[in-house]
Amino acid sequence: MAGCLLAVGLLFWFVRAQLSAHSFDWALARSSIAALRWKWLAFSLVPIFGTYYGRALRWAVFLKPVKPRPSIAALTSATVIGFTAITLFGRPGEFIRPYLIAVKERVPVTSQIAAWILERIFDLLMALLVFAFALTRVRGSGVQVGENLAWVLSVGGRIVEITCAAVLLLILSFRHLAQPIQKRLTAALSYLPEHRFQRIERWISAFVQGVESTRSDGALLLIVLYSVIEWLLIAACYWSLAQAFAGMITLNLVDVLIFMGFVSFGAAVQIPGIGGGMQVVAVLVLTELFGVRLELATTFAFLTWILTFVAIVPFGLILALKEGLDWHSLGRIGREMSA
């Protein structure tokens, strides 16, 4: 909630500052939409939809310790519904996907929460690598950036260093220390009443089962491979969107990767129904780093959000209704799982 409020405040502050410094040319914004190369815009949906299937394949690797042969179709359906829930309900919607997968595959919910944590860790690692690439390219280019973006670069560099170390430490701890930690925790909690101790012991055991996939070298390599493919597909989506703006905004492949590196962190704050951090960072980077007009940057940022979050919503709602889920049941699951 605090992150959402911060994103809303930053959004209003940034828009107000930009509008006070420049008058917003609505005619230019409308003409930019009319001048879009719609074939490229339509093509950008192909790689972004491919990421949902890729996520299902990666989740199947996470599932192997508890379900050696999961249904890829069921995982893909749960993934699409889960990302629809994130757009509709914000971050509480994150927990709908592990819940649905646990129900579909008949495995403990706790093991799928562990799989979700693993997915977040590997996505964060990929985002950090892309962001680190963006920082090195910007700093090495000698581009004169504005005061706001200079602050982002300075703080971002420190965050990348600290977070990379923390992420690698987490992966190593899951890989080598999960079972020793389980033994220590169960020993430390043995003083609890029997019924409560057994319940916590089952929870810890299921969680450890969920992170067992990282102990296998082959599985870990496969997880990394799927993670790289997923981010390549996201880059392909952004590059296709840049081609749709050809003649209005000029971004080469390196520029697209820089843009993606910054936006991946803005996407961490998702305000239910309206997005938030992604749009702010996208507009900021385009205007201050690439010198794009505010009107064009706003249109580009809006379409980025539509492609990466909103485009999947109709398909997610159809699949949810097909499985007997509606708006209220999805919201209830999200609230209960995040409580």
Image (cartoon, rainbow, N blue to C red):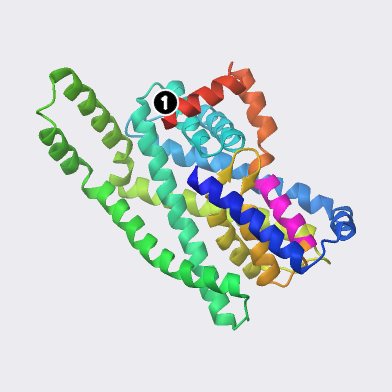
Q: Is residue 117 visible?
A: yes
Name the side, left or right, on which 130 lies relative to 105.
Answer: right
Residue 80 location, x and y as percent? 58, 34
Q: Residue at x 54, y 34 (%)?
A: 79
Residue 315 location, x and y as percent? 67, 31
Q: Residue at x 77, y 51 (%)?
A: 41
Residue type at mark 1: give it: Ala
Q: Is residue 233 visible?
A: no
Q: Dot 1, how many residues are within 10 Å of its Cα: few (below 14), some (14-19), or many (20+)?
A: many
Comparing 180 with 14, the one in front is: 14
Predominant SS along the magenta part: helix
Q: Which residues are magenta?
A: 295-308
Task: Indicate the quadrant containing the C terminus: top left, top right, bottom left or bottom right.
Answer: top left
Name the side, left or right, on which 338 lies relative to 291.
Answer: left
Does 302 appear in magenta? yes
Residue at which label 1 appears: 102
183 above or below 203? Answer: below
Name the side, left or right, on which 203 lies relative to 155.
Answer: left
Q: Residue at x 67, y 48 (%)?
A: 305
259 above or below 336? Answer: below
